[in-house]
Amino acid sequence: MHANGVVSATEPDLARYRGAVADLLLEIASHTGPEDLPKAERVLTERLPDAEFAAVLAASPEGCPAAVDRLLREVRHYQPGARNCAADLVAHIRIHLFALIDVMWWGSTRAFVLDSDLAGAADLVDLEPLRRRGELHFRYRRQARTLPLRAVRAVDRRLRPDHTPRTAGLRFVQARPQVVTLLNQLAADFAAVAPEVPPLWVTSLARSIEQQRRLRALGYTATLPSAHCVGYAMDIEMSWFRRFGAAGMLAGLLLERQRAGEVNAIDEGQTWHLCLSPAAVAGQDPAASPAAVAGQDPAASPAAVAGSAPDLGG
């Protein structure tokens, strides 16, 4: 299925693709440092023409050759660092290979280019009124924008270091209604299997390409194109729930949704990245989502994101 909701007869087998990725990662598992980049690139160049990879690459709106070139550029520019969620080169490659599924699904959908594009966007809902009305079953916090608030949070972190996840918070509190519906469902499922554990915690939702570029410049693993920039991706805290013994249960719930074809799930260490699939979006009842409450139009507006996200490989 593509972003316009039309099912394709040649839809790639994502289970086979993920299995092929696992096999490829095993092949390069002993080559994890920046000095091993030539070996990793050679393995990728040899394996990407395989049918399992080629099917997903060919389904990318930018076309197979361009998708391969972009992937190899991302690999060549790998730099380990505290802000890079990839623990090593293998994790870096895994994240970018799985992110190709997001691009296949949403790469032709209009992206939010500037921060200002997110404010008041007709196809997003503001989470704050929903939170005040008690209609959100998950938690998040807003990014501290002022020095006094940052100071308060720094003190709180010193006094209660594990009270909340170590996250900066949401820069934007807008999300697509279908994403809010999914997160509420996941939060309810998580509460059912782990009733003594704090609620699901969301660390990132919709972003602009402008913000994605800022994150890349700071050394974060921020892919482009990105499903965050079209509003269909979210990041969920995982590491914090290990202190409650609940991370395995949460991961199991996310993988269940992936097996059902609802999401693409990527383990990024502290957080797990989720991308809602076009099939899941098409299958949601708009009347049951926060879109009906907020009076927003949940439909995506198709356009070419490739023209919005210039080549960042150089």
Image: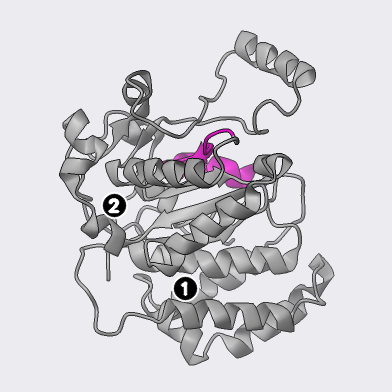
Q: Residue at x 21, y 65 (%)?
A: 5
Report x, y in % for residue 130.
32, 25
Vertical placement of residue 4 versus 119, above or below: below
- Is residue 295 visible from the viewing direction of this image? yes
In the rendered image, residue 148 lying in the magenta stretch gets the answer no
Type of the residue with mark 2: Arg
Front-most of 50 and 200? Answer: 200
From which residue to which does the magenta span run? Answer: 198-218
Please tell me which of labels 2 and 1 falls first in the chain.
1
Front-most of 310 and 61? Answer: 61
Which quadrant does the C terminus fall into?
Answer: bottom right
Instruction: Give the residue pinned by disc 1.
Output: 67
- Residue 140 falls left or right of residue 9: right
In the structure shown, which secondary structural element does the residue marked by tag 1 occupy? helix
Which quadrant does the N terminus fall into?
Answer: bottom left
Instruction: Give the residue pinned by disc 2.
Output: 110
- Is residue 113 visible from the viewing direction of this image? no
In the structure shown, which secondary structural element does the residue marked by tag 2 occupy? loop
